[in-house]
Amino acid sequence: VFLNENHLQGEDKSTIKLGLYDENETLVSCMTFRRVARFDKKYEWELSRFCNKLNTIVVGGASRLFSHFIKNYSPKSILTYSDWRYFSGNIYSKLGFLYCKTTVPSYHYITKDYKNTINRMSFQKHKLKKILPIFDESLSEWENMKNNGYDRIWDCGSMKWEWLNPGNLCQTKK
């Protein structure tokens, strides 16, 4: 619930969820990790989400959560991404991550009422037959989506960041 209310991408399928609470025992900051990065399997972990409660500043929150993860899980390598549309990625630099590259722009589908965006992964061509009222196998994913009233919205790419346990060499070229 916290991620759905406070993170642009909502909940995730992380295996480790860490949180900070205020004096009233209200969750005010959250950081999640998943074992083995989704898009680059050479990394042991992926930092999937970090956010504070909306309209709340938690001084040092990211650092405390990240330090707790490092201390308790002893990772060798961690990968994360920051969305270039919204963030500079400075928080990852402060946590000791190294910038690797900026990914190419990608897209989300936007619903017919133009109110919600849905990650393109939900609409891969092999899934469309089961979820679209109108589907033609001979057409591309995009053509099938247009025939069902969807449009695409493009992002600006993401910045890829890596953290390596001291002593390891950078795994990717900058």
Image (cartoon, rainbow, N blue to C red):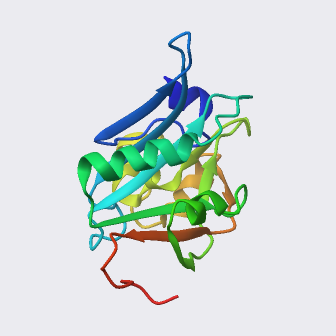
Residue 173, given in percent of the width and then of the height, sits at 46, 90
Q: Quadrant location of residue 86?
A: bottom right
Q: Is residue 136 left or right of residue 69?
A: right
Q: Is residue 5 left or right of residue 164?
A: right
- Residue at 74% x, 40% y is 114
Front position in the image: 61 or 133:
61
Up/down of 131 relative to 94, above or below: above
- Residue at 56% x, 61% y is 92
Residue 84, given in percent of the width and then of the height, sits at 68, 64
As drawn, the residue found furthest toward the top would be 24
Front position in the image: 116 or 28:
28
Q: Is residue 80 left or right of residue 70?
A: right
- Residue at 52% x, 88% y is 174
| Number of marks | 0
Residue 77, given in percent of the width and then of the height, sits at 32, 67
Residue 165, given in percent of the width and then of the height, sits at 33, 69
Up/down of 42 relative to 50, above or below: below
Query: Is residue 70 visible from the viewing direction of this image?
Result: yes
Front position in the image: 70 or 105:
70
Q: Quadrant location of residue 36?
A: bottom left
Query: Is residue 135 visible from the viewing direction of this image?
Result: no
